[in-house]
Amino acid sequence: MAAIELRNVRKSFGAVNVIKGVDLDVRKGEFMVFVGPSGCGKSTLLRLISGLEEITSGDMLFDGQRVNDLAPSKRGIAMVFQSYALYPHMTVYENMAFGLTLEKGKDKEEIRRRVERAADMLQIRQYLDRLPKQLSGGQRQRVAIGRAITRDPKVFLFDEPLSNLDAALRVATRIEIAKLHEEMDNVTMIYVTHDQVEAMTLADRICVLRDGLVEQVGTPMELYENPNSVFVAGFIGSPKMNFISGDKAAAYGAETVGVRGEHITIVPENGTWSGKVIHTENLGADSYVYLEMGTEEPVVVRLDGVNTYKSGDVVQISPMADKIHRFDSAGKPMR
């Protein structure tokens, strides 16, 4: 495993500054997830760590050693991309073994041992003699992950590896990646995604990026419960936090009040606010009620079970007093 340090790392493509001075520590054996909106620089940052892109300025250290000028092959990393990038004419075994066959000093028995170990971890041993075209998308992605495992890396880098899969396969493969982290607890993993569920369920810590800078780093629940800005509060969580400004927030001494849908209750009378139902979603175990309240976006109330509200209903709502987030005019929390 390797500890990774980024010190004022910057990356420019011509006159365009993409990474604008990132300071970040990734701990040994940690599962770190990069999230942020499209164009925030998360994939570029991953490529800088891998060595596939050159750092414009700043320092990158692996276990205290500066690696700015170190080739990707010398960094002890393995990378899994969004595309499977498997050789179609090779079997699963040959795809997983290919990188090892290029290394000097690796005999066939050692290669077989590594491939079969990786195949067992990912439950794909029965597919070793098949061609990629004979596999499902989820199985192909597990082969791509297995190919990386066989290299016995210090650092695993994942660049949105599940985005090409359908919903069911995403869940299944996400579970496989979580199990992989538990079994390979000596490997540092960095994972790029735009998916909230992947970030919240996989990460030891999440790094939220915005416009080429780190906005906040913390455990999933730290970011969920104590966001350090309106941006993080609105980005982490699905559905995102509700924001209420103006007169409705003034009573709390704030420019903006934030409250999550599950922390709002619909009350018979004397609620803190009122709103008109414009849409409802019944999902079985829980449901969502969308309210028009004169806010920039509808306010979402999350309820247990099925609700019977209809469009046009006017309801009273109250936030849980200890779950209110107050933000100032700069979008920063007021503690």
Image (spheres, rainbow, N blue to C red):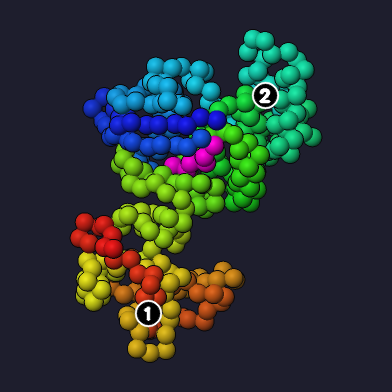
Q: In the current view of this chain or complex, which residue is farthest to the top? A: 104
Q: Position of residue 268 (x, y in %)?
A: 42, 89
Tag 2: amino acid: Asn
Quarter residue 225 falls in: bottom left
Which residue is at a point 23% across and 77% down the rendered structure image? 251
- Residue 130 in view in this figure: no
Which residue is at a point 56% across and 77% down the rendered structure image? 306
Which residue is at a point 28% across and 34% down the rendered structure image? 20
Tag 1: amino acid: Ser
Q: Is 232 drawn above or below residue 318 in the view shown?
A: above
Q: Position of residue 148 (x, y in %)?
A: 61, 28
Magenta stretch bounds:
29-37
Q: Is residue 297 rendered to the left or right of residue 43?
A: left
Quarter residue 58 falls in: top left
State the residue position of label 1. Answer: 318
Q: Position of residue 319 (x, y in %)?
A: 38, 76
204 or 114, nearer to the observer: 204
> Is residue 30 located in the magenta-colored stretch of the structure?
yes
Q: CA distance from mark 2 to mark 1?
A: 57 Å
Label 2 SS: helix
CA neighbours of label 1 inside 10 A, class few (<14), some (14 to 19), many (20+): some
State the residue position of label 2. Answer: 95
